[in-house]
Image (tube, rainbow, N blue to C red):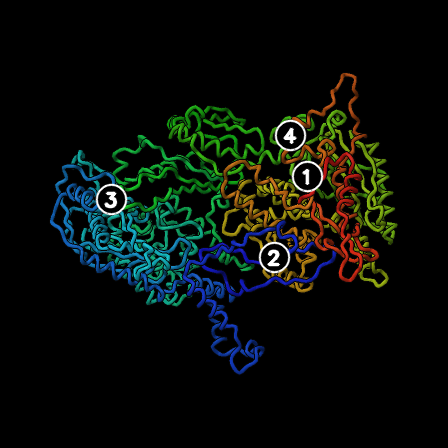
Amino acid sequence: MVDKRKREAVVIPGPAQKASRKETSAPESPRAFEDSEVSDFVEEDDDDDLLEDEGDDEDNEDAMDGVETAMVPTAGKSGRDAHFAPPSREEIQGLQETSELYKSNIFKLEIDELLSEVRLNLEKMKSVEKALHHLRNVIDSIPETTETSLLAFEENMSKKHKIQVPFCEPRPSADAQYKFSYRKPANINLVGSYALKTVIKQPEGFNVDVAITMPSEIFQDKDYLNHRYFYKRACYLASLAAGIRKADKKSAFNIEFANLNGDVRRPILVIRAGGDGSELDFTKAKCCIRLLPAIPDALFPASKLAPTRNCVRPSNAATDSKLPPTPTYNFSVLSDMTFFPHLTLLYARTKACAAFRDACTLGRIWLRQRGFGGDIQRGGFGSFEWSMLMAFLLQGGGPRNAPVLADGYSSYQLFKSTIQFLAKRDFVKEPAIMGNESDVVVEGGNFVDAKHHLDLFGKMSGASLKFLRDEAVLSFNLLNETAVDYFDALFLKRMDEPVLKYDLFFTVPVPSAHDKSYDATARLDCPDYAVHFSQRLHRILARALTDRVSLIAINGTRVDSWSIEASPKSDASAVQVGLLLDPQASRRLVDHGPAADDKQEAARFRSFWGEKSELRRFKDGSILESLVWSAKSVEERALVVQQIVSYIVKRHIGQAVADGINYKYLDFSRFINVPKQLKSLIYEQGEPFETFQPALFAFDRFVKDLNGMEDFPLSISTVLPASAALRYSTVLAPLPRKYSELPLVPAALSYVDVIDVVVQFESSGRWPDDLRAIQKTKVAFLLKMAEILENTAEGCSVRVGLENEDLDIANAGFLDVVYDNGYAFRARIQHDREMTLLERSLKGKAVFGKDKDNYQRALDQYRRFFLNTPRHTFAMQALCQQHPSLSSVVRVLKRWFNSHFLTCHVPEELIELIAASSFTESGSWSTPASTSTGFARCIAFLGGWDWRADPLIIDFDGSISGSMRTDILEKMAELRKQDPAMAHHAMFVATSYDLTESFWTRRQPTKLVAARITALARATLGQLMQATGPAQRIFATPTSDYNFLIHLNAECNPTAYKSVAVDAKSLLAGRTQQYKNTAANSIADVQVGFDPICRFLEEVQATYGDSLLLFYDGLGGSVVGGLWNPLVLGAKPFKVNLGFSAEPISEVAKDKKAKFVINKAAILAEIQRVGGDMIGSIEESN
């Protein structure tokens, strides 16, 4: 398989050096499975290069030529001399400047490489230039017309030219007296990013904006009032469309209307290439030309159009009546007046500040990756607003209006300082004013161009402004991070995918009938009902959800362009809502309102909440208006916000809208809970919200019993938790079992989980100094502990078990304690001296061969049971307590791994670390507060993780410094150099408690399994993005990739009740009838932690490991998948110790030697025989 760097970006092919990196390979041991031989099993998409090529082929060839040239040694020198020559004075100076102007040398290289990839080669836009010149000539030749009424003009356009004039609402009245006549434009100029040379390549193409300045003589002094300007603007645009279409006899262009930045008052002409192959065909440029009507900046008095002024006056309004301001209306007029003043300002900044263009490009990429854009529906903050903000900061914005930025700044410094300004500045409380002291300062804006009375943030709502600031805060923190390079998270990764970004994401249908709030006053400033609905919905949700959410993001559906022969498209059908939840407050079941004696506030509260509000007396004696939300489980409690949304939308907007809400998430609760029919049968009844707390209480009881032992030779120092049940990480919550039901339930419900713990004694010099003697001493201690507990601890059964009987230098025994409260514990004794003796033996020369393998096995066991598992448990405990949703994310992720038959190939601790990484390294996202978001991010990480080259680092407590991270990278590089075939440590994972050993991935997963995980994660992520259909499909693994399938008998599987597809009805069919005289089962007879299916499959794998590889679901799976080792397939000559069961073939080779092949039938028959009743059937694939 080819190692590809997965990066998601807006740009063309990724870095050439990274793209050229090739995976090294080396022969593996006979037991290894070659990737190339099982490509179907780990199939990966070939079209996953997310750095899409949006330029022409010549651009890419030139870019690659430059890279190749740079790598060619200088003529007359050897390759070594060219690469290792001493640095020149200029190079030294460049390195010094880099350290001063950029975060690091690497960061500068990454920025330079990114800019070179996205930058458009304007010299190769000849077809666009020809089209622009042609359009200018056409527009200049459009004949002028005589004055006519608007309605007559509209009728003429419709009948003669088949063009619908794009009037905004409200349309011109039938008795309108003002008239329109077409006159030639005063100016035709390029504007926007193409003119400033800051345009970039992007998948959907780019825009070439042309401002058409309408002459002053077609307007009157008061045309800025009551939509008169916009009516004439629409007529002028229709005239341009008619003239261009009339001149376009060869159909070189496709002409459509569109709304500029989603503003229905400001339609524009969009001209796309017709694809006729003529010299005017600019299809290959992947762009469109937009004609933007504009007016001179002095046409209307700017002071009359300030955000606080009213410019839309109803016909029935009294002359002295006080009318509300129309800031968005005024903004639309002023925006058409300021094209050229702002273009002049920005052009001047590009001349004065050399890095201004590059900083604008970085800002454009940053905004795009986060879903921001100039459209109202995308927040109203795009590349233009970014450029104007930087221009402002180059001349002011600091204390005493001192410049925040300097002309000598690098592009990185400009970008970072602008992000810092957005993160620190509260524009609502402290608006930014751009202008000289002599300019009039206006009120009512957030970022005001004082000279033109224009709020440059006029398209932004308060919510989008907060959203922008929150994103800036996240990015500024990443920019200040010195230990980690977050370049990818800042610029290359798409951060706006709702499934990954928001904790709760849903769509709300826009009512077809306008609600009462959209009255005549509301229409004055908001002609687009979808925008009005979005603003109203935000106000309702913000008041209802209070501190349960940290962000409410509402995006409207962007209206596409439409034919010039059709009327403007109607309102959007739905709005998208994304919520970021507060991890604690979002799960609250009771909301407290005002006190009963506060009559006015209590009345407002009841009016808003309706019948949901009720008076309640609390323990402190207060009587408050309250809201109580229902939840019967922990999972339902996490969905309280959804209850609130549905209720409040129903109350204030309507039942139909509430019913139409589409929550874009998958409910995973059923996959981490036992069905209700089985739960009441096998578990003791507890509190509805109990999950892991009963197990922790039981652990405390066990510790207390151990510490209470008297007459024991040594005192217990510590009892350490070493189980997933004690770190909130088991797929099914460890609820107390009903031991009395065990004799009556079918075998499929009989498995009893065991909770592992580690017992440490106080130090003593009386321990033997021999490994085998230490094990015997530990067993003796266990027997003594069992004897004491049987006599002193109440309600428990105690027994000692043996393990590692074939390895007498490893831990030999354990103590099982089964309590009548439904829990079973397994304790092992730790003695520090063991590790020292094992390490010393491994370093000695007397141990070699198989003995050395045994000592290594014993050391690995010691480290697992007594060191890493307790450390891991404490780390996960603390993190789960810090992040309430982490536990459920871990559980769902474990379910995913198990359901895809990876139980025996991926350590559960590794799965937990992968889940934890989404909370410790969230990057440009906020920390997830919901199960669905956390799980989706884990899957996205697995699908994009280049585990061949990059380690996974989990910093639980913030203790991993930059130098430590360097050590981790060096350790991984060293391992890859020593083991290029990745026979060990296919994945490298470092944690706060295990920096450079990557203990959990030393042997598993293998390279084959790691590739399988990547392929499965990518397929799963695709399904998660759809967020529709049953969640079951995410946990359904394809079985067609396996060579054979072993179908298990569910009746003999004690963990069948844990299955992802458990059939409760069929399992209960085997239940034994209980009679009155049936004695309750004694806890002494309970067998814990025994899974015969798992033991059987482990034995098969150990026996036939050279020939096959098994995959299965350890949580009650009914099918086992098997792959034949490709190294043993095919005919081979016979030899002693062939390594697998073989049979001769009748074919005679050229060398006349007998050939043998693996005897698949015999192996499968033996598996069937040994498995007995546990196996239903074995199916071989064709």
The type of residue carrying mark 1 is Val
What is the CA distance from the residue labelled 2 to the residue labelled 4? 39 Å
> Disc 2 on helix, strand or loop?
loop
Instruction: Identify which residue is drawn at 41% across, 46% down.
Output: 466
Q: Is residue 596 above or below residue 953?
A: above
Task: Report x, y in % for residue 409.
Answer: 41, 66
In this view of the protein, which residue sits in the foreground, 1028 or 607?
Answer: 1028
Q: In the drawing, does residue 433 fall left or right of residue 495?
A: left
Foreground pick, 403 / 353? 353
Residue 84 at what x, y percent from top left?
57, 77
**Residue matched to label 4:** 1063
Which quarter of the figure is the N terminus placed in? bottom right
Q: Which mark is residue 1119?
A: 1
Total number of numbered labels? 4
Report the disc number at residue 166.
3
Q: Which one is in front, 1163 or 1070?
A: 1163
User: Viewer-nearest of labels 2 and 3?
Assistant: 2
